[in-house]
Image: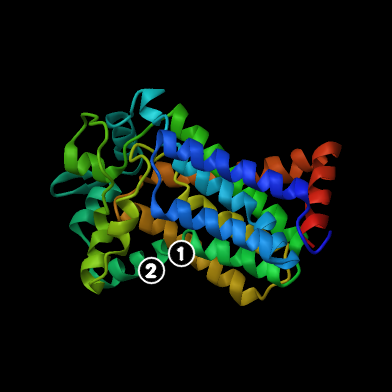
Amino acid sequence: MTDKPSTREISILVISLVAWISVTATFIGIRPEHIGMGVLIALLFLISQETKKLIVALLPFAIFAISYDWMRIVPNYEVNPIDVKGLYEAEKNLFGIMTAQGVLTPNEFFNIHHCAVMDFMAGIFYLCWVPVPILFGLGLYFSRQRKIYLRFALVFLFVNLIGFVGYYIHPAAPPWYVMNYGFEPILNTPGDVAGLGRFDAMTGLTIFQGLYGRNANVFAAVPSLHSAYMVVALFYSFRARCYNWLRVIFAIIMVGIWFTAVYSGHHYIIDVTLGILCALLGICCFEYVLMRIPKFRSFIERYTKYIE
């Protein structure tokens, strides 16, 4: 690997950035973060050999972000009907809680019965859902565990792509949608912070308001990818060199996110369960199917060598 990018590498970079920006500008519209991301990628790719390797290593996370953003081009509710009532009724039948008001879904129960401590912890847990896995990946990369890093990053991407396919196969409304709008699908409904708004109000911040205000599609509750990410991180923590206390923290965060998804009204228990299964499916398919295909394994070996 030379110190400076080759002409071929620069050509691939330019073509890729132009294609991404062109599609985004045409079908979605350019936002400041698009320009910032493009400039950062170009600068890091050109500055030095080490920063070039970092950008190549982070490619799976970039593809994840672009893929999520591009779901705005063809909303999933234009592909299949939106499930609002069916999922709600299934949740009530499977996990309903008997109260004086009748049978409630766990989300409806927590919407009535919540407290400040749980609201605060819920916000903390949900702030971890993407940053912690990405920081874990960067930790693997900078501690020279790049073979494990690459497998983790690619599985993270693979699990997301499986989840995105699930969104299109079965568009579904989250619990807060039913609580706010009932069972009639209303297209182009804006994102909602739901129970996480209590964290924003408590802290005086607008973190979740800002995050959910940019939600690409509110009818993407199944599976819960929030519930999948820490499963992937925890799995690869056992394949990496890391402290047991870190694995314990990962396990706590993982369970905390599962609980918060339901407590905050963003997901049903069904969504969370399917999110966990999505993560396990992605891990098993990658490790025990794809990695046994000689050409794919050879590609992974070349990719690993390139970023080492």
Question: Secondary structure under badge 2?
Answer: helix
Callout 1 environment at 10 Å: few (<14), some (14 to 19), or many (20+)? many
Q: Which mark is residue 137?
A: none
Quadrant where the N terminus is found in the figure:
bottom right
Q: Position of residue 28 (x, y in %)?
A: 39, 38
Residue at the image position 42 percent from the left and 29 percent from the top:
74
Residue at the image position 38 percent from the left and 68 percent from the top:
124
User: Of 268 and 104, which appears nearest the observer?
Assistant: 268
Q: Residue 128 carries which label?
A: 1
Q: Spot the residue most to the left.
A: 101
Residue at the image position 40 percent from the left and 54 percent from the top:
32
Q: In the displayed structure, would residue 205 be above or below residue 40?
A: below
Q: Where is residue 142 in the image (x, y as percent from the top left)?
A: 69, 71
User: Of 145 and 30, which appears nearest the observer?
Assistant: 30
Colour mapping used in the image: rainbow
Give the amino acid type for the residue marked by disc 1 in the picture.
Answer: Cys
Give the amino acid type for the residue marked by disc 2 in the picture.
Answer: Ile
State the residue position of label 2: 124
Is residue 87 left or right of 134 when viewed as pictured? left
Q: Where is residue 83 in the image (x, y as percent from the top left)?
A: 33, 29
Q: Is residue 54 visible?
A: no
Q: Cβ–Cβ below 8 Å for labels 1 and 2?
A: yes
Quadrant where the C terminus is found in the figure:
bottom right
